[in-house]
Image (tube, rainbow, N blue to C red):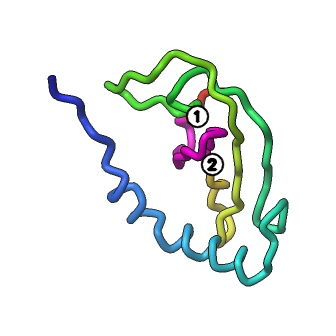
Amino acid sequence: MHIPLLDLKAQYQSMRSEILAAIEATCDEQGFILGPRVVALEPVVWRDGALGCPQPGRQFPQVLVPGHRVRIAAIGGDSPALDYHLSARGGWLFCAAGQAQL
C-alpha cells in the first residue's frame, strides 16, 4: 500500500518568512494569550483525527477529538491569518487557507 505524504517542507518554505516574523513579533511583545497577533483562540471538538484539516488520499480515525483552533495574524498586510488546529493531547497542524472543515 502506498500512502502519499504531504510535503510540509515545501509548504513551510513558501511561508517561512511570514511564520518566523509572526513568531518573532509575538515573542518580542510577550503577547502569547490573545496578544496582538492572536486573532482567535477557540475550543473545538474536531469531527475526526484530521483535526478539521482533511488531506486527499489520507484516512484518519473517525472519532471526536477535543482541541482548539488558533488563528494568528500574518505579518505584512494583506496575507490571510494562519490557522493552526490543535488536539487536547498535544498534536497540532497548520491548516492552509481553504482547507479547513469545521
- Between the C-alphas of marks 2 and 1, the distance is 8 Å
Identify the residue at horizontal 56%, vertical 70% (top origin).
18
Q: Which residue is mark 1?
A: 100
Quick one: which residue is furthest to the bottom in this view?
28
Question: Depth check: 89 or 51 in front?
Answer: 89
**80 in the magenta segment:** no
x then y, percent, for residue 70:
70, 49
Which amino acid is tagged 2? Answer: Asp
Residue 44: name its quadrant. Answer: top right
Circle 2/circle 1 CB separation < 8 Å: yes
The image position of residue 61, as x and y in percent, is 47, 20
**Which secondary structure, mark 1?**
loop
The part of the chain drawn in magenta is 83-99
Identity, as a three-letter code, of the amino acid under mark 1: Ala
- Please give the name of the residue rendered at 60% of the width and 76% of the height, measured from the top-left corner: 21
Assess whether residue 96 is covered by the magenta stretch.
Answer: yes
Disc marking residue 83: 2
Q: Is residue 24 found left or right of 61 in the rendered image?
A: right
Query: Quadrant location of the C terminus?
Result: top right
Q: Of helix, strand and loop, which one carries label 2?
A: strand
